[in-house]
Amino acid sequence: MDPINELILNHPNLEDVENEVRNAAQLITDCFKAGGKLLLCGNGGSCADCEHIAGEMVKQFAKDRPLSPELADKLGPELSSELHGGLPALSLPSMIGFHTAFNNDDNPEFGFAQQVIAFGKPDDILLGISTSGNSKNVINAIKTANALGLKTMGLTGANGGRLSGIANISINAPAENVARIQELHLPIYHAICAFVEDQIFS
């Protein structure tokens, strides 16, 4: 079954955001096929979600990802038997050395934006995760990504906050409580990861 259809089957309360989820999944698929990468940013629990999503993308998730015969031949049997296809996703909060330096020397509200300056290219996507939709460092990163020509996405709550007004695609989980929003974010991004994997490693 299509992972997004399965998402709605298991979580009927997400039916109103099905189009946004599907559009986000297709955009990420197209980005990877074009040689771009996925950047992710968020705070607290949303930081953990960035790590989670990046992990599902970089290593195989729900299905086998065979290497191309050409790459397998270059790697040789020892390496190729242990490795599989990966997708370039980078969790921006993970760079602790950068963030401690930036937070000490500069305004922490612009830390993610500085990373977008360093890593972002027009073929890339920035996904900002914020349950309120108003996290200042996430908003500044999305604004910077928009200025640089990246595609931008927001994953937030029912209200959407400022994030839903500036991201190209905003997935507003239908909940107000922070914990409940986070509980809905997990199946949403798992469905996106499975969809992308299906499309690229079919």
Image: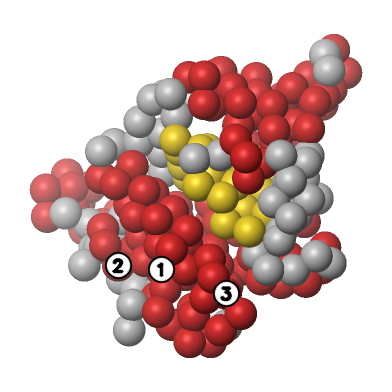
Q: Which mark is residue 124?
A: none
- At numbered mark 3, what does the secondary structure look like: helix, strand or loop? helix
Q: Residue at x 52, y 26 (%)?
A: 146
- Residue at 18% in and 47% down: 71
Q: Is residue 25 above or below residue 61?
A: above
What secondary structure is marked by label 1? helix
Disc 1 marks which amino acid? Ala
Q: Position of residue 143 (x, y in %)?
A: 61, 26
Which numbered circle lies on residue 194?
1
Residue name at image x 32 percent, y 84 percent: 1
Q: Is residue 149 left or right of residue 93?
A: left
Is 96 placed above or below 59 here?
above
Residue receiving disc 2:
198
CA gap, disc 2 and disc 3: 21 Å
Q: Is residue 72 left or right of residue 127?
A: left
Residue 59 in view, yes or no: no
